[in-house]
Image: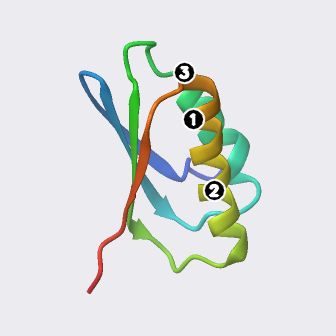
Amino acid sequence: MIAPLPYQLEIAGRLATMYIVGELTAFSTPVLREACDALPPAVQVMSVSLDDSTELDEAGFNVIRDLHQHWRATRNGPSRLAQRVD
């Protein structure tokens, strides 16, 4: 059985928001990179929301760091991280 993808995407003009759902592992990196690469060229800003993610460990932070670096390298655009604070 294939696990569901750990994200949902919302696109509004030049902005895409990636909602991370569940746990991030090293195996999440290629899936999330592929999702970024598949976005239309008009999307220039990426926002990542961790509201629905589980607690991040070191591997999860590495995935987020890699995703932001990949976005900046491939799109030359800004990225930002949003996390709910309770």
Q: Nearer the viewer, residue 81 or 60?
A: 81
Mark 2 vs mark 3: in front? 2
Relative placement, left or right, of 13 versus 41 is left
Residue 45 is situated, as x and y percent measured from the top left of the image, at 38, 33
Q: Residue at x 38, y 67 (%)?
A: 52
Q: Counting other residues with Cα less than 10 Å from the Cα at mark 2, is it few (<14), some (14-19), or many (20 or more)? A: few
Q: Earlier in the sequence, mark 3 or mark 1?
A: 3
Q: Secondary structure at mark 2?
A: helix
Q: Nearer the viewer, residue 44 or 25?
A: 44
* CB under 8 Å between discs 3 and 1: no
Q: Nearer the viewer, residue 69 or 40?
A: 69
Relative placement, left or right, of 35 versus 66 is left
User: Which amino acid type is shown beneath numbered disc 1?
Assistant: Arg
Mark 3 vs mark 1: in front? 1
Give above or below for 30 relative to 48: above
User: Which amino acid type is shown beneath numbered disc 2?
Assistant: Arg
Which residue carries the number 2 mark?
Answer: 65
- Quick check: can you spot residue 76? yes
Residue 81 is situated, as x and y percent measured from the top left of the image, at 41, 57
Q: Residue furthest right?
A: 26
**Res 55 label:** none
Q: Secondary structure at mark 1?
A: helix
**Res 38 label:** 3
Q: Residue at x 45, y 13 (%)?
A: 41
Residue 2 is situated, as x and y percent measured from the top left of the image, at 68, 48
* CB under 8 Å between discs 2 and 3: no
Which residue carries the number 1 mark?
Answer: 72
Query: How far, Cα to Cα, is label 3 from label 1?
Result: 15 Å
